[in-house]
Image (tube, rainbow, N blue to C red):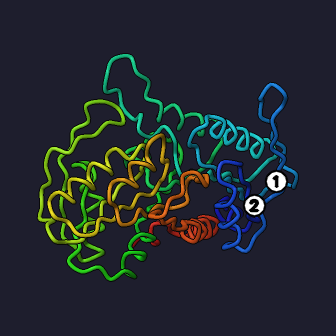
């Protein structure tokens, strides 16, 4: 009976400040307004949150990416707490980009597994369910002790590249770990596959050792989950160009574009860099080769399915 009452409870959409335009776009696709909420900072920097509409018995969806600054994560936790204390029937946290995801293992002595800590915080704050786009590693789903709907931006990118009607395309995995994602793209785009043998001497530093696969005189598409400083992408683009590739395209779900990323991409000879709007980019990080695709329609449909207790995985069949 609890599931039936949830399905019938009214949907309520809440948004933090990390990516307000994406939240507004999702709300537009759902043909529902965003709930009125007051979010402000006290003089000492503390975050104040007040939900300005009735929440009791509602099926609440909270939108907030948790990319830096750290206040984005803290703001999300306070929004969850406010909704739970206002007697929401269910709280689903929609995290387009889950920060700290790369710190998912103890690969050297005396380091934190920060991804697990962040998952614990979301759970302890009172979230009942998580919806996220392209975790850095799939096993992050197991870091949460609540149900997780892991969404993929692949349908958005596949549609984009099908419209380009590229011939003899090669989908390139930027490292061995990305081979599975690249293989999925290659299958959907009727393309062949190549893999870059990469080593990382230190954090945010990547060196291409070899390219496994035939890329000469062909268009190449490098697929990845995120672009941070663009060291991996820039090295891969230049390596493919040295081997005689024609146009080189790059797609990544999350565009952090930290530090020298924009300069590196602009100097690399890339034809186009396609990303989604999971992270709000300031105008200073927008450049001519950048193409931002909207993830809002996909997330809106997933929210509809979640609200009515339908299968979300059917969106990716």
Residue with the most extreme front position: 267
Residue occupying the point 70% across, 40% down = 75
Residue with the most extreme top position: 110
- Report whether 183 appears left or right of 290: left
Q: Position of residue 122 (x, y in %)?
A: 60, 39
User: In the rendered image, which quarter is residue 96 located in?
Assistant: bottom right
- Report whether 247 appears left or right of 41: left
Distance of label 1 from label 2 (alpha carbons): 8 Å
Residue occupying the point 63% across, 45% down = 127
Q: Is residue 62 above or below residue 152?
A: above
User: In the rendered image, which quarter is residue 314 located in?
Assistant: bottom left
Residue occupying the point 64% across, 40% down = 72
Q: Position of residue 68 (x, y in %)?
A: 57, 39
Circle 2 sits on which residue?
12
Residue 238's mark? none
Residue occupying the point 87% across, 55% down = 53
Task: Rate crowding at label 1 as few (under 14), some (14 to 19) or many (20 or more) other CA atoms within 10 Å.
Answer: many
- Report whether 155 appears left or right of 235: right
Q: Are marks 1 and 2 in contact (CB under 8 Å)?
A: yes
Q: Is residue 142 above or below residue 168?
A: above
- Report whether 200 appears left or right of 61: left
Q: Is residue 37 above or below residue 287?
A: above
Choose the circle earlier in sequence order: 1 or 2.
2
User: In the rendered image, which quarter is residue 161 located in?
Assistant: bottom left
Task: Rate crowding at label 2 as few (under 14), some (14 to 19) or many (20 or more) other CA atoms within 10 Å.
Answer: many
Circle 1 sits on which residue?
55
Q: Position of residue 54 (x, y in %)?
A: 87, 55
């Amino acid at each position: 009976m609890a599931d039936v009452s949830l399905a019938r409870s009214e949907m309520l959409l809440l948004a933090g400040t990390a990516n307000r335009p994406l939240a507004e776009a999702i709300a537009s696709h759902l043909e529902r307004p965003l709930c009125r909420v007051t979010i402000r900072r006290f003089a000492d920097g503390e975050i104040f949150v007040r939900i300005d509409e009735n929440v009791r018995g509602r099926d609440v969806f909270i939108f907030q990416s948790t990319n830096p600054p750290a206040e984005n994560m803290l703001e999300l936790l306070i929004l969850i707490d406010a909704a739970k204390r206002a007697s929401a029937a269910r709280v689903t946290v929609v995290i387009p980009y889950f920060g700290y995801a790369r710190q998912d293992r103890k690969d050297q002595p005396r380091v934190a597994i920060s991804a697990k800590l962040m998952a614990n915080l979301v759970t302890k704050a009172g979230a009942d369910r998580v919806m996220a786009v392209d975790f850095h590693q799939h096993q992050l789903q197991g870091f949460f002790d609540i149900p997780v709907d892991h969404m993929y931006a692949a349908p958005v990118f596949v549609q984009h590249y099908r419209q380009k009607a590229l011939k003899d395309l090669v989908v390139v995995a930027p490292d061995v770990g990305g081979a599975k994602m690249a293989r999925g793209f290659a299958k959907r785009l009727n393309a062949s596959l190549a893999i870059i043998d990469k080593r990382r001497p230190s954090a945010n530093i990547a060196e291409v050792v070899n390219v496994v696969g035939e890329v000469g005189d062909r268009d190449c598409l490098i697929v990845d989950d995120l672009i941070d400083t663009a060291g991996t992408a820039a090295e891969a683009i230049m390596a493919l160009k040295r081997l005689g590739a024609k146009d080189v395209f790059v797609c990544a779900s999350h565009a952090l574009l930290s530090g020298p990323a924009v300069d590196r991409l602009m100097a690399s000879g890339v034809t186009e860099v396609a990303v989604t709007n999971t992270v709000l980019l300031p105008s200073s990080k927008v450049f001519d080769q950048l193409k931002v695709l909207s993830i809002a329609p996909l997330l809106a449909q997933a929210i509809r399915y979640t609200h009515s207790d339908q299968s979300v995985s059917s969106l990716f069949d």
